[in-house]
Amino acid sequence: MEDIVNPIEEKVQLPDPKTHFLVHPLDLPGARKEFLLGWWLGVFATPQVYTALLAVLWAVSNNYVTPVLVPLVLVVFAGWISVKLTGGAWDYIPGKRHDKDRRMTGMTIAASLITSLALFAGLLIFMAWTASQDLVPGFSAYPLGMGSAIALIMAGELVIKLVRRRSLELVSDVISLTVVVAAVWIGFGLLPEGRDIAPLDLLPGAAILAGVWLAWLLFTQIEARRDHG
């Protein structure tokens, strides 16, 4: 009886497990391009980018549907394609050999810069637009609440990584947090009533952003389990 050939081994030549047991898609020429494309699309499908797109479109559009619907469709579609590509890249490697803790410091820092600067620019555009509008009292609390929630969540993630001693990941987190805090601080000074808003007034905007963030975390955790078993 002929031996059954492992379909994974037919696709790529894996490194010798005796010298290189854990394998990442970046180690395999046949999987590298697929993984990188999926990974960068995943960077686009983040709450920071969604919030940035929402802020910009809210300022430049003349309706209340486009700013919410267009970023949502784009981010969800990018996230779906990202999952398919990265999952396909990991499929080249048997589950027990997945190097799922591989640190990609350069890519992570670059992604943090891109998402943070996009969010910074989006919030500034939105805040500048809001400051020039005759809006109902208390409207400023929503964008400031969302911005404050992002800053608090990112600060919490930074603390968790400090406790876990993931020092190589701290640089990107510090960069992101600094940029977001700067945008929120400018917002409190720029937006109408920004300096007079009570902390409780920030809760509705913060709750919206927290909901988006939790949904994103749940989605990424589910997909990570699918990829690595």
Image: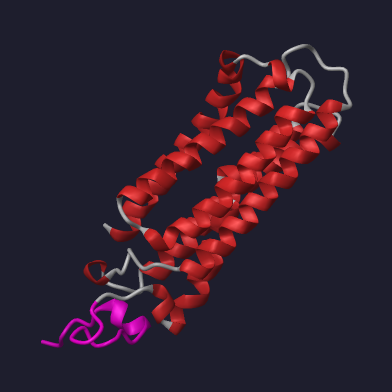
Is 102 drawn above or below residue 114 in the view shown?
Answer: below
Residue at the (57%, 17%) spot, across then down: 199
Q: Quadrant of the N terminus?
A: bottom left
Residue closest to the eye, 115 or 5:
115
Residue 84 in picture, x, y percent from top left = 47, 59
Residue 120 location, quadrant? top right
Residue at the (75%, 29%) spot, across then down: 189
Please state if 212 lies on the left or on the right of 220 as rendered: right
Residue 29 in picture, x, y percent from top left = 45, 84
User: Furthest-top residue in view?
Assistant: 137
Q: Is residue 70 visible?
A: no
- Is residue 4 shown in magenta? yes
Q: Is residue 217 visible?
A: yes
Q: Which residues are magenta?
A: 1-21
- Figure coloring: secondary structure
Residue 72 location, quadrant? top right
Residue closest to the eye, 167 or 111:
167
Residue 59 in picture, x, y percent from top left = 82, 34
Please state if 112 lies on the left or on the right of 143 as rendered: left
Residue at the (36%, 84%) spot, across then down: 12
- Is residue 130 shown in magenta? no
Residue 198 in picture, x, y percent from top left = 62, 14
Is 69 drawn above or below residue 168 in the view shown?
Answer: above
Residue 137 location, quadrant? top right
Q: Please state the total of marks drawn on the protein image.
A: 0
**Main secondary structure along the magenta-highlighted residues:** loop
